[in-house]
Image (tube, rainbow, N blue to C red):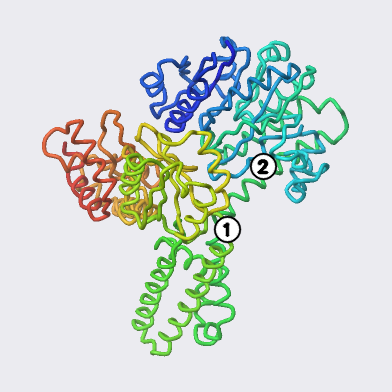
Amino acid sequence: MKLSVIIVNYNVRAYLEQCLRTVFKALEGLEGEVFVVDNQSTDGSVELVREKFPQVRLIANTENVGFSRANNQAIRIAQGEYVLLLNPDTVVGEDVFHKVVAFLDAHPKAGGLGVKMVDGTGHFLPESKRGLPTPQVAFFKIIGLSRLFPRSRVFGRYHLGHLPENENARIEILSGACMFLRRRTLDEVGLLDESFFMYGEDIDLSYRITLGGYENWYFPDARIIHYKGESTKKSSVNYVFVFYNAMAIFAQKHFAQSGGVFPTLIKGSIYLSAAAAIATRFLNRAMLPILDLLAVLVVLTLSPVVPHRWPFITEIGTDLAIGLVVVGWVALFGGYDRPLRFLPPVRALLALLVLGGGLWWSLDGTWTDILETALLCTWTTVLMLSVRLVLHLLRIKGYGLRRKERERILAIGSPAAAKHALALLWQTHFGLGWSHVIAPGTPEATPQALARTIRRQRVGEVVFCASDLTWSGIISLLEQLRHSGAEFKIAQPAREFIIGPSSIESLADLYVLDEHALNSPAAQRTKRILDVVIALVLLLASPVVLLLVPKAGQLLRQSLRVLAGDRTWLGYLETPRQGLRLPQLRPGVFDLSMLLKGKPRPRSTGRVNALYAKDYSPLQDLALVWRGLRSFGRR
C-alpha cells in the first residue's frame, strides 16, 4: 500500500465531511487507506463517518487522548509506505497525493514533506515552511523581530521568510496540519512524542527526522486549504497555555543540556510571551470600552460646564467612576456588540439625556441645567461615534461596521447548484441584497473577470459550488482572488451545507435575524439581565418568599445559582438528540413545558425549543417565569 491518511478529529463534523470528500477524490488511482481517530467528539462526527464513509478505518476514543497519542494509534496499524497526518479542517486538491508520492519516490532521503497551505481567504500560511526554533530563532520570534523583518535570513528564520513560497526547498520543520512522512523513517526515529498533548509534536518529530539523517522538504506544487484554527479553537486562553507549554517542553527536551542561562531565559521568555498573548486578547476585546471611557473623561475634563455648574460631580465620585457608569450604560444598549453599529451608543446617550434631564427637573433645575446635560451627552456621543468610525477605517480586526444581512453574493457553478446554494444562503441570511451566477468555463469565470465583477458589484461573498468545480480549481481561485476583499465559501456537493473560513451554514443550524435571535449578543445580554433582576428581587424579598412559597429554601438556592451563572430561570425542554443545533443555554430552573398542553412529545419539544430560540422575547420569559414561580413547590 502506498499511502495511509490519518485524520484526528475533535468536534468539527462539517469540516471533517468536506475533508474526507477531498481525500477520497485525491486517492483515486492510488492504493491507500484512510483513518479517522475521533477524540470523543460530541457533535455526531463518529456517526457521520460510520454512515457516509464506511470505507474509513474509524478509531472512536472514549476520551480525548490528545493529538500525538491519537495519531500514534493509527500509525501503529497503518500499512502505507507513506503516512499523511492531516487536520480535518483542510481541503486537499485532486492532484496533491499523486504529486507528493512521485516526489518522495524520487527523493529517498526525504523523510518528511510539507505542502503549500493557504487559509480560507486564499492567503499563504507562513507555517507551511518553518525553521528549527533554536534558542536564538525562538528568541527573535518572541521579541517580535521575526515579524518586523519577515524576510531576513537572521531574524525571519522561524518561518524561513527568505525562501520563495513557490519554490521547492529543504526545510527544517513541517506543519502537523499536513505532514507527509516516510514509514521507514518513522520506524527509525520513532513516532510522535506523546508528552506533547497538542502543539509542538510536529516540531519535535521534524527535528528528530533531521537528526536521523533524513531531509524535510517544502513542496509548493501541491496545495491545500487549511481553515486555520477550526480544529483547535485558538480563541481560548487555554490554547495560549497549551501552545506555549508545548514550546517550553521542546526547549527543555532539546536545548536544556547546552547549559548556561540561555535555555532558562528562553523558557522564561516563552511564558512571558504567553502572558502577553493573553493580555493582547483581552485588550483587543476591551479596546472599544476603554476608548469610550477615555472619551467620557475627555468630555468631563475639557467641558467648562462641569467644574462651575456641576460641583456635585466631585462630591458623588470621581470622573473615572462616572465614565465607568456611562460605559456600562452603553454596554446595556448593545454598544459593544459585533459587528459594531452607530445606533446603540446613540440610543444609550439619548436615554441618558432623558434620565439626566428628568433628574434635573425633579430637583428644580433650570432649562440651562438641562441644556448643559444635553451638551455633555452630545459631545460624548460625537466622540464615541468618531472612535468607531476610526476603528472601522483603520480596518482593525473585529471592529468593522459592515453588516452581513442582505449580502451581495456571487455564485460560481451550474445554474442548478448555484440556485440551491443561493436558496440556502437566502434562508440563512434572511434575504440577499444582490446575487449573480457565473458558470464555470465561461469568459466571466476567469480570475481576472471575477476580480472585476467583485470590485464593480461590491460583492461581499463568493460561493464556489464544489459539485461543478474541482477542488484544485477552487484552491487556485482562492489564491488568485485573495486581495478582492470578498469572503469565500464552498457549497458542498451533497448540498447540505456551505463552509466558510469561520462559518458553517445549513438548515440544521439556527440562523435568524440579530434583533430576535437567542444567539444574538443583545438577546443573551437581555436574558442574563432578566435572570439577575429576578434572582435579586427574590433574594431581597426572602422574608416574604419564606412565608408564602412552599420549598422557599430551594427557590432561594436556585436564585443564588442563577446569580452565579450556573442556571437560567427559563431553559429548553429536554429532548432526544436532534439535527437542529440551537444556541446554548444553561440548565433552566423552569422549562418551556408551560407552552405545551399535556405531556411533551419529542417532535413537539424540538419545535418549541426552536421557536423559542428563533423569536426570543423577554416579556415571554417574564410571563413564563412568573407562572413557574406561582406553582413552585406545589407540584
**As drawn, which residue projects farthest toward the left?**
598
Which residue is at a point 51% across and 23% down the rendered structure image? 64
Give the residue displayed 44% in from the left and 40% down from the top. 490
Q: Which mark is residue 274?
A: 2
> How far apart are the two marked residues, 1 and 2, measured between alpha carbons?
22 Å
Foreground residue among 436 and 443: 443
Residue lying at 17% horizontally and 31% vertically, measured from the top left: 601
Looking at the image, which residue is at 56% across and 65% down? 393
Quadrant of the rendered structure where residue 329 is?
bottom left
Mark 2 or mark 1, which is nearer the start of the sequence? 2
Considering depth in this image, is 424 or 85 the residue closer to the camera? 424
Label 2 residue SS: helix
Residue type indicated by callout 1:
Ile
- 542 relative to 136 in the view: left or right: left
Task: Report helix, strand or loop for mark 1.
Answer: loop
Q: Which residue is mark 1?
A: 396
Figure quadrant of the N terminus: top right
Relative to residue 350, is residue 414 depicted above or below? above
Picture coordinates of residue 58, whole percent (x, y) = 46, 16
Q: Is residue 361 shown left or right of residue 476? A: left
Residue 569 in sight from this viewpoint = yes
